[in-house]
Amino acid sequence: MKKQNNAFLEGPLFRNIVTYTIPIILTSVLQLLFNAADLVVVGQFCGSISVAAVGATGAVTNLIVNLFIGLSVGAGVTVAHAYGCRDDRTVHRTVHTAIPAAVVSGVILTVVGILFSETFLTWMGTPKDVLGLSAIYMRIYFGGIVFTMVYNFASSILRAVGDTKSPLIFLSIAGVVNVLLNLLFVTQFHMNVAGVALATVISQAISAVLVVIALMRRTDACRLYLKKMRFHMGQLKKIVSIGLPAGIQGSLFSISNVIIQSSVNSFGPVVMSGNASAGNIEGFVYVSLNAFHQTAVNFTGQNAGAGNYKRVYHTLWICLGCVTAVGVTLGSAAVLFGENLLSIYINDSAEAIGYGMIRLSYICLPYFLCGLMDVSTGALRGMGASLVPMLISVLGVCGIRILWIYTIFRIPAYHTPECLYLSYLISWLATFLCQLVAYLIVFRKNRRRWEAQEEYLPER
């Protein structure tokens, strides 16, 4: 293998982590702007009911998609391990297995999404005055979901080998297209939510094509040859063994969010509108924190592959410190400027803005706890342990939230948005503490193996 980017394996770890993470944050923010642009345009030109319709699709969409998005995590970890120990053959096979896996995943999601969108929304208790618009948005969105899958798998591979800038450039281009098409389809063609959904699909198609071209132009083992794409069973097995638990975890997270969204729906369209807008704002905080999860996965993955246990351990603590600082800063800013930000989405209901502020206050201020939970999960996955964090997260996040909703929240005196949102804070804290203990156990278990490997590694 040619001399690779050794920012993972050599040099000042803190600086390399920050340098690596910033483009991921910017890329994630741009990706989130796809949905934000949808909400802003329909909010300004179509009203709060359309905002509620788009917002109501988020939880159920994530429920369906996250199972397969988890496989992209498995692809990234598999590439990172092989790249860290300089195994060209495994890198090559993983890349050429991951892309067809993304296409197959996208086709499955398209069929499920188009056929069952309205059914899923009905199960969630979506109000009738919102249901029709929500179903239209979901069907169009799932019609182009294959592009989302290809982008996520391909960009996961690029990040695993240190390239965080290319996805940022590609999404910048696609993001501009998305905003322009939103305005065209809604203001000129009067397509309402159908217009913003179509704009999102076209934009995702652009980003998917660009990221695939980037893989085809690489000069290392990650170079993609379209004619060589096939399922290599050894690599597919590892992708699934790491990615499936991550996907199950994401889907089960979404189940708890679907239940929460159903609980929000019980308060009516005004609360739904405020909740959707606030959720979109806090999404910008979340993706900034989740960027450190991705960093923890890939830095841990490459150093675990290289047997560099000291950098594996230090990666966790640096990422925990960074995510705390970013979470406290951005969470506080979201609350401080909350009313002004919410008015971008909602211009016809002061009451909806008030409910949006309730969500921001209860979720954004302690959001750094979610970041701590995600970083510890990412560090575990980077070491190849995916089942353990899945089980802890399912019990800690999903279990606590569902138990809360069906016990405390059902008490009439506590049947309020404030009580509902409090379940997030409690679940984040409990899950993080358990993940941290699990990390220390897994790390110590693997340390002897890494120490034994160290003397046989090539000079770095």
Image (cartoon, helix red, strand yellow):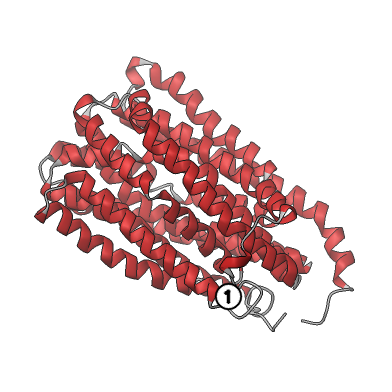
Residue 333: image x %, image y %? 32, 57
Of the 4 image quadrants, the one containing the C terminus is bottom right
* Residue shown at the point (50%, 68%) measured from the top left: 21
List x then y, in percent, for residue 148: 43, 54
Residue pictured at 10% horizontal, 42% vertical: 348
Q: Nearer the viewer, residue 119 or 276?
A: 119
- Res 298 quadrant in image: bottom right
Location of residue 48 by image quarter: top left
The percent coordinates of residue 450 (x first, y second) are 83, 63
Tell me the quadrant of the picture where the N terminus can be found. bottom right
> Mark 1 highlights which residue?
16
The answer to whether residue 337 shows anywhere in this view is: no
Q: Furthest-front residue in view?
A: 227
Identify the residue at image location x=66%, y=74%. 221
Tag 1 secondary structure = helix
Q: Nearer the viewer, residue 102 or 1?
A: 102
- Residue type (three-letter) at the residue carrying disc 1: Asn
Say if residue 165 shows up in the picture.
yes
